[in-house]
Amino acid sequence: MKKKLIGIILLCLMLAGASGVCAGVDYLKIGFDIMKNEAVGSLRIGLAAAEVLAGLGDPTDKSPSRIWGADGLEHQKWRYPAKGIEFDMVNRDGAFRVNMISITTPCDYKTKQGIGIGSSAKEVQAAYPNQLNPEVNDTKLVAGTIYGGIIFGMDGGVVSSIFIGAAAE
């Protein structure tokens, strides 16, 4: 009986984590709010392709467009390696818009909370005190969840990359 009860409790805890709810905090909702409101520099989710081109010029590389099974939409990667910027662009109603943003060195853009490449883990924790998901490790800090939010890639205790969007389907 005890083993069965422990199994049920563990299953509930796993399901709560998968749903983005941990200790009564809805990290999934936090992540979607972050995706709607956060930016790095002037880059944000939903930015029109024309605005990206006006600000950054033509990308160095564009992947072929392909339809994703997860959402049924046309996606394309736009890469600016000399600027440390990459986008997942999605075609909605005949127009491409920013769907995900990834920055690395040498990009010096910062989030609205002042976090950029080279910021410390303590600075990230201070900037996002109520949004950081407690399921963290040495390689990343997550504000929201991997299903939506910001993922701060960490290397030696400092931010080495910033990703805004959904990293998992």
Image (cartoon, rainbow, N blue to C red):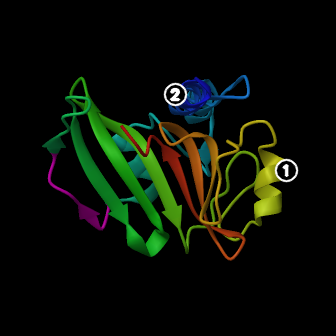
- Looking at the picture, does residue 102 appear above or below residue 10? below
**Residue toward you, 150 or 43:** 150
Q: Residues within 10 Å of mark 1 (few under 14, many from 20)?
A: few
Q: Secondary structure at mark 1?
A: helix
Label 1 vs label 2: CA separation? 29 Å
Q: Residues within 10 Å of mark 2 (few under 14, many from 20)?
A: few
**Residue toward you, 20 or 69:** 20
- Looking at the picture, does residue 138 appear above or below residue 39? below
- Residue positioned most to the front: 1
Marker disc for residue 30: none
Our reading of the magenta stretch's main secondary structure is loop
User: Which residue has dot 2 on it?
Assistant: 15
Residue 123 on the magenta span? no
Quarter of the picture holding the N terminus: top right
User: Which residue has dot 1 on it?
Assistant: 126
* Amino acid, disc 2: Leu
Q: Secondary structure at mark 2?
A: helix
- Residue at x 76%, y 55% (from the top left corner): 124
Which region is colored magenta?
59-65
Residue 130 position within the rendered picture, expressed as x and y whole percent measured from the top left: 79, 36
- Looking at the picture, does residue 15 appear above or below residue 145? above
Q: In the visual, does 44 lie left or right of 95? A: right
Q: Nearer the viewer, mark 1 or mark 2?
A: 2
Quarter of the picture holding the C terminus: top left
* Amino acid, disc 1: Ala
Work out whether mark 1 precedes mark 2 in sequence or the reverse, and give the earlier one: 2
